[in-house]
Image: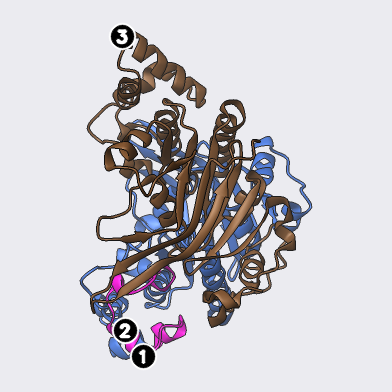
Chain colours: A blue, B brown
Amino acid sequence: MIRVENLNVTFGAATVVRDVSFSVAAGESFGLVGESGSGKSTVLRTMMGLNRSWNGTIEIEGAPVKSTGRKDLARRAQMVFQDPYASLHPRFVIARTVAEPMRINGIDNSEQRARELLEMVGLPGAFGFRFPHELSGGQRQRVAIARALALSPKVLLLDEPTSALDVSIQAEVLNLLSRLRRDLGLTFVIVSHDLAVIAHMCDRLAVMRDARIVETLDRRQLQEGRLVEDYSRELLAASGDV
Amino acid sequence: MSDKPLVDVENLHIAFPREDGGWHEAVRGVSFSLLAREKLGIVGESGSGKSLSSRALLGVLPEHARMSADRLRFDGIDLLQASPRERRKLRGGRMSMILQDPKFSLNPVLKVGRQIMEAFRIGYPALSGAETRRRAIDMLEAVHIRSPERVMDLYPHQISGGMGQRVMIAMMMAREPELLVADEPTSALDVTVRTQVLSIMDELVTRRGAGLILISHDLKLVSRFCNRVLVMYAGRIVESLRADEMHNARHPYTRGLLACLPSIQSTGDPLPVLQREAGWANPEGQP
């Protein structure tokens, strides 16, 4: 479903992603963990075609990102950002925000479908007429998820989807994401600095540090503590359970 | 620990005017105390009143807020009777606050070195310029910043979030406060940097005998770091317990919060979701 090979991303003189490779099977959930500045968000943004200067191979559903048009790419993969406050248009009611990608892509009946999508993420009926500032953080993140699903993509790229939320709301949003993945057969790539979130949501994960992937492991290896790199161990120790 | 509390708050109420002319009670009868060398955690969701309660202590509530309390004391000083001038003298000197986001709390057009030196200059006006600079550099070193001399000459946008947070801590610690209120000091930080920042604050508490109030929504962090934890819900303290007794929490809200945390040992099953009960918000609702 997703194939990333020898990806290098540069910002001016700085190389922020160095020789990153991974692949994700259809229906799988893959996690990227690491500290700020390790390049994990940059990998996601590059996959969505939001960075210019990179080399290597990225394919989503077999389509190479380099030569695929923006609209086509948007129908294959969508992104959910960390900050639900910053990623919604403040002057649009949320039904319009959700309908926007469908309007751009000339899909009929976009308003009806926007209402269905909002209902699917737990914001039924009159919620559609609210503005972002009239919603809580968790509700806003639900809107961002509904919008990401508007073009029925098969891949969702989630950049710290719950780090801005309270733990009680985080649980609700993570459950929603798991349910949608199962019901719609989605493939996830999730970026987080919280190893527990990744362990809960992902089948496999990669640990990033200083622009590189230092270790790739599956959930079982993580749970049994079979980590090779010191840095991964440090990360595991720091996110220990109560 | 001495027995005389450093901070003593009883029956604190904070309310904000509503559009319809009524009052919205954000904090409803909160009482707690803090000893020197004690680390007190306050946890709760956004809007539970945890930040407001400690802001009242420092006297930095918004002007339109209405505050009342039976007792509000710091080291024997009656804060309810203190003049604005006295309270301003306490703030920054004997009590200080570390805020969540260095991006919004540091002055963007001043080099960080100058901002730390300012804290020294206000606290110790007799120091020479060179001595102030030397102390600021020492302070940056104390918060584990590598090459502090270089960092002195950087602007806030040139440093990372974790460094910004440590710069703020350096500013607050310059005056060696007796009470430190840290409001979500590490939520913008990576787990690895978080451990460092906490150990710096821990040092202040143990070495200099300060009292610390740590406000956070992160139960794991609070239970590992603090001595005692207050759990707030809808403007009230619903449970108070020793940090190492966190797993024996009795209130359904505390238990719910603990249960909904994802774990490394997760099986992938849906997380238990908090089922809120109306009774939690009432004083009678406490088990």
Which residue in the protein does label 2 denote? A128
Q: Determine contact: label 1, label 2, CB under 8 Å.
A: yes
Q: Residue at x 49, y 52 (%)?
A: B9
Label 2 sits on a secondary structure element that is: helix
- For the image, the number of numbered tags is 3
Of A161 and A154, nearer the camera is A161
Q: Residues within 10 Å of mark 2 (few under 14, many from 20)?
A: many
Q: Chain of mark 2?
A: A
A125 falls in the magenta region: yes
Instruction: Determine the main secondary structure of the stretch shown in magenta.
Output: helix
* Alpha carbon distance from label 3 to label 1: 66 Å
Q: Residue at x 25, y 60 (%)?
A: B64
B153 falls in the magenta region: no
Q: Residue at x 46, y 83 (%)?
A: A122
Label 1 sits on a secondary structure element that is: helix
Report the mark closest to the observer, 2 or 3: 3
Q: Determine contact: label 2, label 3, CB under 8 Å.
A: no
Label 3 sits on a secondary structure element that is: loop
Q: Which amino acid type is marked by label 1? A: Gly
* Alpha carbon distance from label 2 to label 3: 62 Å
Q: Residue at x 27, y 73 (%)?
A: B18
Which quarter of the image is occupied by the C terminus of chain B?
bottom right
Q: Where is B252 relative to B129, above or below?
A: below
Answer left or right for A36 relative to B60: right
* Whole-percent x, y for residue B55 in the image: 39, 50
* Whole-percent x, y for residue B62 in the image: 28, 55
Which residue in the protein does label 3 denote? B128
Q: Where is B142 relative to B54, above or below?
A: above
- Dividing the picture into quadrants, the one containing residue A78 is bottom left
Tell me the magenta residue range: A116-140
